[in-house]
Image: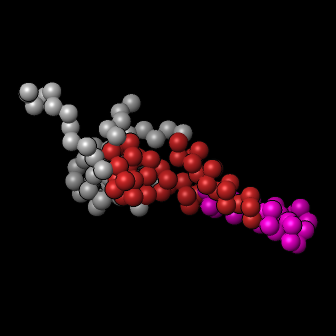
Amino acid sequence: MSADLQTPAARDWSKSFWRGLACKCPACGEGPVFTGYLRVTPKCAACGENLDDLRADDAPPYFTIFIVGHIIVPLILIVERAYMPPIWLHMVVWLPLTTLLSLAFLRPIKGAVVGVLWAQREKP
């Protein structure tokens, strides 16, 4: 069998997931996966792996909303049940907290999605 027809070696998706979650290159774990807040670097500075073709699309915001919702909603219900604060206090506390958690989780979640896409050799 020629080299062109051989299937490429499998990549460890769990390792690339954790590397992406740490916002590092899924291939080597050394270079950063982002050049800005959410812009994926075209090539890893450490190993030269091409990361520009990996498109996470809507998955990171979806997972972020899912995770943040599962954190915030039970907290809101517990506080409402225990203290019954006025609605304006709920707004003052929960809206900024939800925003901050979403911004904090979005980048690592996108890195993890990019890591899994890299491991699966997904191209657009």
Q: Percent position (x, y) of residue 33? A: 37, 53
Closer to the camera in the image, 27 or 99:
27
Q: Is residue 66 above or below residue 77?
A: above
Residue 79's image quarter? bottom right
State which quarter of the image contains the C terminus.
Answer: top left
**Which secondary structure class fits the magenta region best?**
helix
Q: Is residue 98 magenta?
A: yes
The residue depicted at 32 percent of the width and 38 percent of the height is 121
**Residue at far left of view:** 2
Give the residues drawn in magenta, as a range. Answer: 76-102
Q: Is residue 87 above or below residue 8?
A: below
Left or right of 59 on screen, residue 97: right
Q: Percent position (x, y) of residue 80? A: 85, 65
Q: Percent position (x, y) of residue 67? A: 61, 54
Name the colouring of the figure.
secondary structure
The residue depicted at 53 percent of the width and 42 percent of the height is 59
Residue 28's image quarter? bottom left
Q: Is residue 119 above or below residue 71?
A: above
Residue 100's image quarter? bottom right
Q: Is residue 72 magenta?
A: no
**Residue at far front of view:** 1
State which quarter of the image contains the N terminus.
Answer: top left
Left or right of 36 on screen, residue 92: right
**Residue at far bottom of view:** 83
Q: Percent position (x, y) of residue 97? A: 69, 64
The residue depicted at 15 percent of the width and 31 percent of the height is 6
Left or right of 66 on screen, residue 4: left
Can residue 58 be seen from the camera position used here? yes
